[in-house]
Every structure is written in structure tokens, then in C-alpha cells.
Image (cartoon, helix red, strand yellow):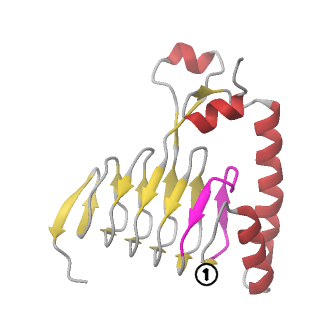
Amino acid sequence: MMKTNKQKMLAGDIFDVYDDELVAERAEARKQIEEFNALGERDPERSKAIIKKLFGETGQDCSVHATFRCDYGYNIYVGDDFFANYDCVMLDVAPIRIGKHALLGPKVQIYSVNHPADSRLRRNGAEGIGKPVTIGDDVWIGGGAIICPGVTLGDNVIVGAGSVVTKSFGDDVIIGGNPARVLKTNIEK
């Protein structure tokens, strides 16, 4: 049996982002996001309810500031005590999993989607390849940082502002730069 484009997307295979089912799901997510962003700081309880409905899973004390953007929402999983500052973007074609006590500075971008390197595939409608992003507990991602598809960050990691994280890093490190590299190890807890 042939996979649907959504099944391909969820499996990390090349898929067509213009598939009717996926277009409809993104449109539904955008309705919720537009409502959330329009609320701003006026109704914190309603804002939290929208995020709780939109995300695949939220822990206790999940706080996201407007404006926020994502593709689907249902592929975003965050633990307890999660905070995302203004203007964050999470392209959640593949799962984005963020542990407990995570802090995202303003304009943090997390991408779980890539495009085929072969231009012939891109021209023929093969638009996406999902690669999950996993972020551990007690991670602080500085403002303007970009986390690329397929990256895993361990526990107790600090990502410097403006960094571009193109590869995975283990626990207890401070990383920064473009591309990000270890700046300090063995962070005290």
C-alpha cells in the first residue's frame, strides 16, 4: 500500500508539502495561531488554552509569548516549566521534543524540516524531509538562535544568542557561534 504524504512526512521520508491533507492541517493550525497572536497579553488563560490544544503535549506551566509560528503544532512536545519568548518559530514537520525547565529567548527558531539537495526533486514537488529535534531538560536557548533539523541537545545546555546549531551536543555544555561549537564544558548545576 502506498503511503500518504502525511505518513511520509511523519516517517521522515520526502513528501509533498502541497498535499491537500497537509495544507488543510496547516490552515487549521494557522487559525489557532492567529487567534493566539491576536490575544497578545490580554487573556493569558485563553492563550494557554490555545497552546495546550495546538501542541501535541504540554507540561505544567507552559508559557509562550506572541507572536509565535509553527506548521502543525501537533508535533511539538514540551515539558513542565516551558517558556518561549516573543517571535519564536517552530517548523514542526517532524517532532520537536523539549524537556522540562526550558527557556527560549526571543526569535528562537527550531526547524525539523529540510529540503532535498537534488534540485530536480525540489522542482518536481518533493518539498520536505522531516528530521526530529530533541532538546533536553534545563536548556536555555539565547535570542535569535537557530536549531537545525535533526539536532539533539542534552540536558543543561546553554545556546548562545544568535548561534546556528547544525549538529548535536551532549549534556552540560555552553555552545555558541555559527556553526555552534563548545565554548565551555562541565557547567555547574
What percent of the width, then of the height, locates residue 186? 16, 73
Q: Nearer the viewer, residue 166 or 57?
A: 57
Q: Is residue 131 above or below residue 171?
A: above
Residue at mark 1 = 60
Q: Nearer the viewer, residue 82 or 43?
A: 82
Q: Which residues are magenta?
A: 64-79
Left or right placement of residue 7 versus residue 96 in this view: right
Left or right placement of residue 70 versus residue 176 in this view: right
Residue at the limit of the structure toward the front, as seen here: 1
Q: Magenta segment: does it hold 42?
A: no
What percent of the width, then of the height, locates residue 79? 54, 72
What percent of the width, then of the height, locates residue 83? 54, 77
Q: Residue at x 52, y 46 (%)?
A: 112
Q: Residues within 10 Å of mark 1 (few under 14, many from 20)?
A: few
Regarding mark 1 in the picture, which secondary structure is present there? loop
Q: Magenta segment: does it hold 67?
A: yes
Q: Residue at x 63, y 76 (%)?
A: 65
Left or right placement of residue 187 versus residue 91 in this view: left
Q: Is residue 85 above or below residue 162?
A: below
Instruction: Specify the quadrant of the image occupied by residue 36.
Output: bottom right
Q: Hey, what amino acid is under mark 1?
A: Gln
Q: Residue at x 60, y 75 (%)?
A: 59
What percent of the width, then of the height, locates residue 28? 83, 52
Q: How many marks?
A: 1
Q: Quadrant of the N terminus?
A: top right
Q: Quadrant of the C terminus?
A: bottom left
